[in-house]
Image (cartoon, rainbow, N blue to C red):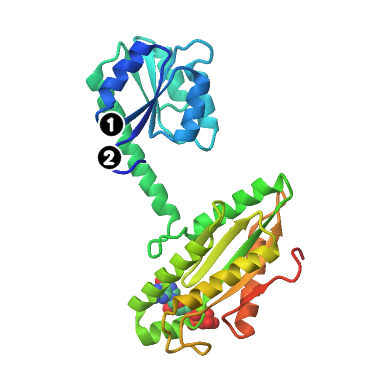
Amino acid sequence: MNSDHRARILVVDDEPANIELLAGIFEDEHEVLFATNGKRALDLAASARPDVILLDVMMPGTDGFQVCEWLKSERATANVPVIFITGVGDTEGEARGLELGAVDYVNKPINPPVVRLRVQHQIELKRARDQLTRMAVTDGLTGLANRRQFEETLERENARLARTGDALSVILMDIDYFKPFNDTLGHVRGDDCLREVSRVLDETISRPADLAARYGGEEFGCILPETALEDAAAVAERVREAIVELGVPHPASEVADHVTASLGVATLHCQPRQSALRVVARADEQLYRAKAEGRNRVCAAGSAER
Ligand code: GH3
Ligand code: MG
């Protein structure tokens, strides 16, 4: 959803008169995009991510039903609400559209106040849905991805990279002596520390496909697709250094006078029909080793596959 209250509406209709009419209804309040054929509609829907699509059933070439089927079959566009524009009395068309996943329909000739309200209703529902979806995958304290998003992303990236047999790496990180930090400075300072560490982690994990998540209380996880073990270990070392540079005072740490973290790294050669979660277990072993060897360090699995 765009910022403020402007939504982005994609109008798909082969008749310029209809496009003009619909633009007139919405353009003061919302951003309106147009497509006059199915192909263009699919391209725009995938690239511009509209909040709602108004789709004419009757178009030469690819009709609205076919366009709707395509939209619903693509991950990027499957959740965009589609409202069909049907001929008046076309009850069969209405039923078919709803079966294909459309959320509503409006009849021609277009009645501006009715179309406006029906579209507004869908925009509000989409906003509420988007907000719930965001909340379900975000950690409330730090704003990072939560464990659910971490695990879903891991399985999805494994499936995607299995096609090329590529590797992905996972970093697990745990703050050192965090219990004594809380015990001496209090939970409010503890929470502030988690937020600062999260920000540093998020800034250091910088490739678009990378994901930084809060995995548990003071444990964080990163997914680095198409990244070999040595490269992931170098990223983990940068994260470790950045946390040292943060310089958050830690009077109760046994390894430094500021907050530090230990990190474990492991790599998965992606394959179909394997659970990607085992790479997390291997990264966890390395994290355990980093703790045992003195903390404030990175340990990486000796060989990529065991
Ligand atoms: P180690 O160096 O071995 O990791 O020691 P540690 O003290 O960090 O490890 P331990 O697992 O014993 O302690 C984790 C602490 O993290 C305990 C818990 O109070 C704290 N913690 C977990 N979640 C939160 C949170 O959301 N906020 C705050 N302030 N503290 C949290
Ligand atoms: Mg800890």
Whether disc 2's CB lies below 8 Å from ligand 1 is answered: no
Residue 78, image x and y in percent? 49, 34
Residue at the image point whose x is 26% and y is 22% from the top? 25
Question: Which of the 4 quarters of the picture holds residue 26?
Answer: top left
Kindly identify which numbered label has been placed on residue 5.
2
Residue at the image point whose x is 77% and y is 66% from the top? 306
> The residue under label 2 is which amino acid type?
His
Question: Which of the 4 quarters of the picture holds residue 109?
Answer: top left
Front residue of 87 and 10: 10
Image position of 226 with respect to 215: above or below: above
Residue at the image point whose x is 54% and y is 75% from the top? 241
Locate the N terminus by quadrant: top left
Look at mark 1 in the image and give the residue it sits on: 120
The answer to whether residue 14 is left or right of residue 122 is right
Q: CA distance from mark 2 to mark 1?
A: 11 Å
Q: Which structural element holds mark 2?
A: loop
The answer to whether residue 63 is left or right of residue 263 is left
Q: Check if mark 2's residue and mark 1's residue have beta carbons within 8 Å.
A: no
Earlier-in-chain disc, 2 versus 1: 2
Residue 71, image x and y in percent? 50, 29
Image position of 79 with respect to 155: above or below: above
- Say if residue 130 shows up in the picture: yes
**Among all residues in the image, which is located at the extreme left?**
113
The answer to whether residue 110 is left or right of residue 209 is left
Image position of 29 with respect to 171: above or below: above
Q: Which structural element holds mark 1?
A: helix
- Say if residue 214 shows up in the picture: no
Front residue of 292 and 34: 34
Question: Which of the 4 quarters of the picture holds residue 293?
Answer: bottom right
